Amino acid sequence: MKRAHGFYSVPYVLWLALFVIAPLVLIVYQSFFNISGQFTFDNYKLYLSSGTYLRMTLNSVWYALLITALTLLISYPTAYWLSQTKHKQLWLLLIILPTWINLLLKAYAFIGIFSQGGSVNRFLQFFGFGAHQLLFTNTSFILVAAYIEIPFMILPIFNAIDELKPSLLNASKDLGATNWQTFSKVVFPLTLDGVKAGVQAVFIPSLSLFMLTRLIGGNKVITLGTAIEEHFLVTQNWGMGSTIGVVLIIAMIAIMFLTGERKKRGR
Amino acid sequence: MKRLMSFLVAIGALCLLLFAGSRHLQQSQGLTSGNKVLTLYNWGDYIDPKLITKFQKETGYKVQVETFDSNEAMYTKIQQGGTNYDLAVPSEYMVQKMRKAHLLKPIDKSRVHGLTNIDKRFRNLAFDPENRYSIPYFWGTLGIIYNDQYVKPGAVQHWDDLWSPAYRNKIMLVDSSRDIMGMALLSQGHSVNTTDIAQLDAAKAKLDRLSPNVKAIVADEIKMYMAQNEAALAVTWSGEASEMMANNSHLHYVVPSEGSNLWFDNLVIPKTAKHYKAIYAFINFMLKPENAAQNAAYIGYATPNDPAKKLLPRSVVNDKAFYPDQTTLAHLQVYQDLGNRMVGIYNDKFLEFKMFKH
């Protein structure tokens, strides 16, 4: 019986080995070679001793944090409101809809919206505020990134809230809790898993956004993704590119660990 | 289950039908008929399609065009093999790099007619002495494009003018380390091919001071932004500039007289080539003045073909922005392949400049 179960897992194990484990091993392996193909630890030494790369890492983490915070701020109330409305499925569909459109197309659309003669600026001018520089600012970068990531934050939170039993809320109110107390002591702790899943789904991809940094940020926002792209395509220094990749993977594992399920103690 | 099966069978039948259809179409166009083909590996939209039709009619060879969007992507594809490109169009530093990597076949001069049509100044250059491997296709410069609604005509003539506080947050730069580092090196009177770290550091420090004026560092999008009046100035290549100017009459292009980059895109025969008769027929076809002129009129880049220039309108050939005069031309510098390590250093400096916060 046990053998039969093992047999069914073959396709997935093969898949994992070929497309997850093997590339990871290759990246780690590649990161120990310099540009002329010699084995070395220099890539890591350079990474850890160069102000540029460390600042870039800090930038990446900082922007990912801002993007995550902004999406969370918008998504939690939205998800809460969604769970209370009729026609949940329709609203949900509308939120998921933008994810069916290619990321580049969405970025180009924002170029049209934010440009000097774009709709936002025309709107501002109409009300007498004059045209503003919107593209190539940190704000527009964070806004567009948040726009793209929002569905991935709303969905897990919505699922968590939707599963909440109304009887718990009623009990909380019956026992004399205020609305705020109900939210902070009952609703939020019970939906925390959804929030964690959302944070993972948003923070990790945000660390290495690179198309947006150029298209919307005008390369005024530089993240590790930019550096990886450059090392693989322009300088062909695959070793350094892989090193940055390894750093990102470690960062992701750290995030998973921090936001993951903990063993519940003392309960 | 039965429904699923019939569905799968239907899809399978459809695939088979499409495969047979496309096969049939290819055969009727002579694409699979062995030796009568030529595969051209070119930049996107970099040849007048009418010329291809003309070539096919004149010679009977069928041309297949495949495109790339960067020298590096092209290099990787040819190096990896598995392709059957007969001709490619790399830029000059890439010709040098491909030559070093033994990815090119020498050109048999006895089969080429009309090489003397190419301007003497553009033959026998350092990246390919005696044109053993390459024939210039188009050439151009790096320069400044400005919008006369925001910048007084004549106010910007030199690289140093870009550093003026008047252009705060108004300049766009191409996202290319060699070009932007090169611009700073030139403005300090150094060579664009310098390997002197002190000079590179000085150039990077100078670029940092440009930072408050830089609005964005972008790639192809620069064309769209400039055409839409998004920025007052941009540093870009002449070919891109001519395209922008076609879309916006307020734009003007200047090549700083103290020096700039001179670039070439060249026809080369990669090691993957197979159809030599077709290759030489095509090279000779493109060297003919009337064809070179037609191509230049369509693409808008400067042609290295001397007799072809006479066939182009006066207003085009006398435009100093695209066909600079002798004194400017004498100050232009051609990039050399500096090797991976040096290219890495240029890129690291450029990355540091991008990270610089004013």
Image (spheres, rainbow, N blue to C red):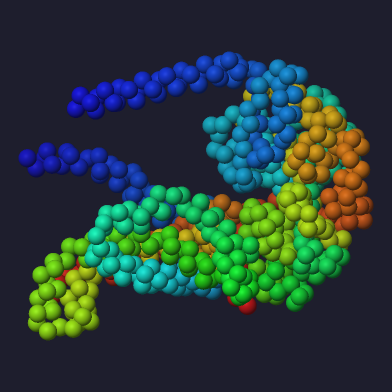
The C terminus of chain A lies in quadrant: bottom left
Above or below, A115 relative to B139: below
Find the residue positioned furthest to the left.
Answer: A1
Q: Locate residue A57, reporting x and y percent.
A: 47, 69
- Can you tell which quarter of the image residue B34 is in? top right
Number of disc labels: 0
* B262 to the left or right of B353: right
User: Which residue is more in the foreground, B339 or A54?
Assistant: A54
Can residue A108 be seen by looking at this rendering? yes
Above or below, A98 relative to B71: below
Q: Locate residue B324, reporting x and y percent.
A: 88, 52
Q: Locate residue B340, reporting x and y percent.
A: 62, 54
Residue at 81% x, 44% y is B302
The N terminus of chain A lies in quadrant: top left
Above or below, B17 relative to A258: above
Can residue A231 be seen by looking at this rendering? no
Residue at 63% x, 31% y is B65
* A183 to the left or right of B136: left
Residue at 65% x, 40% y is B44
Q: Locate residue A240, reporting x and y percent.
A: 51, 59
User: Which residue is more in the foreground, B276 or B96?
Assistant: B276
- Can you tell which quarter of the image residue B89 is in? top right
User: Which residue is more in the foreground, B39 or A131?
Assistant: A131
User: Which residue is more in the foreground, A169 or B25?
Assistant: A169
Residue at 68% x, 58% y is B228
